[in-house]
Image (spheres, helix red, strand yellow):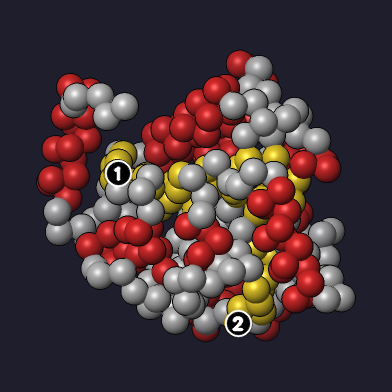
Amino acid sequence: MEILIYQTYEELSKASAQVVADLINSKPNAVLGLATGSTPLGLYQELIRMHKEEGLDFSHVSTFNLDEYVGLSPDHPQSYHYFMHENLFKDINIEPQNVHVPSGTTSNYHAFCQWYEQRIEQCGGIDIQVLGVGSDGHIAFNEPSSSLGSRTRIKTLSEQTIDDNARFFEKKEQVPIYAITMGVGTVLEARKLILLANGTSKAQAIADAIEKPVSSMCTASALQLHPDSIFFLDTQAAGKLKMLDYYQWIQAKKPGAPPSS
Ligand code: GLP
């Protein structure tokens, strides 16, 4: 695991966007796994800037989103379809047929989940999966007690997640209770994982994910099992890490480190 700590949200957004842009520049038909929530908004803003100012080309890129609320249609303002369109897709040159977001309104969730997994495989697997983290340590909507081998399926949201996400809805009662989400096992198959977190509300989840044993009670801890995962944190989200000095030491010494490949 690589742990990178930045003074500001802007810096962490730019650094994580650069990793995605480097992939697209070296592999124009890259497959991206994308996340919603407020955390990756800065990364998406930076990708849009790179597209507009530097010609970053998404015309051969494919994307797969992590999750969607059950019951919300793509035109619902709180659906993740709508979020992605508004915050990224409408401002880059991605082909609509290359965009995949789980359906919150399919008539057969089981069949849809199987199709989604197959479609990821058909596209050659995910090159980089962008992740945020819930305050209860979830990745995508893999709530505490989700199997670390889980695949795309329906999950029941925890009360903590419903409370956290209520800020996007008029009333807490409007937050859907169920979601369709990639599993932890699905996420772990991506070739690279980048997890972004900022703010004090994520500090405990980050400390659990990085420094506690791997556990289904904090599904972000599954990143410990992945050979190529990077945490992009601001100083607040990193605030409860016991080995913080060591991670900052590694980061500072990185430019002089022997090349690993
Ligand atoms: C939701 C999403 C997660 C996201 C989390 C954190 O639960 N399913 O993918 O990481 O929210 O959201 P935010 O970045 O707004 O804190």
Camera sees residue 219:
yes
Determine the residue positioned at 60% across, 82% down.
156
Q: Nearer the viewer, residue 2 or 234?
A: 2
The three-letter amino acid code for the residue at tag 2 is Thr
Determine the residue positioned at 51% across, 65% down.
185
Determine the residue positioned at 75% across, 28% down.
59
Spatial distance from mark 1 to mark 2, Cα to Cα? Answer: 31 Å
193 relative position to 237: left or right: right
Q: Secondary structure at mark 2?
A: strand
Answer with mark 1 or mark 2, whichever residue precedes in sequence: 1
Q: Which residue is mark 2?
A: 156
Within 10 Å of the Cα at label 2, are there few (<14), some (14-19), or many (20+) other Cα atoms?
A: some
Q: Position of residue 77 (x, y in %)?
A: 76, 60
Q: Is residue 71 above or below residue 67?
A: below
Q: Quadrant of residue 252?
A: top left
Q: Position of residue 153 (x, y in %)?
A: 65, 73
Circle on res. 2: 1
Q: Is residue 160 above or below residue 140?
A: below
Determine the residue positioned at 38% across, 45% down.
228
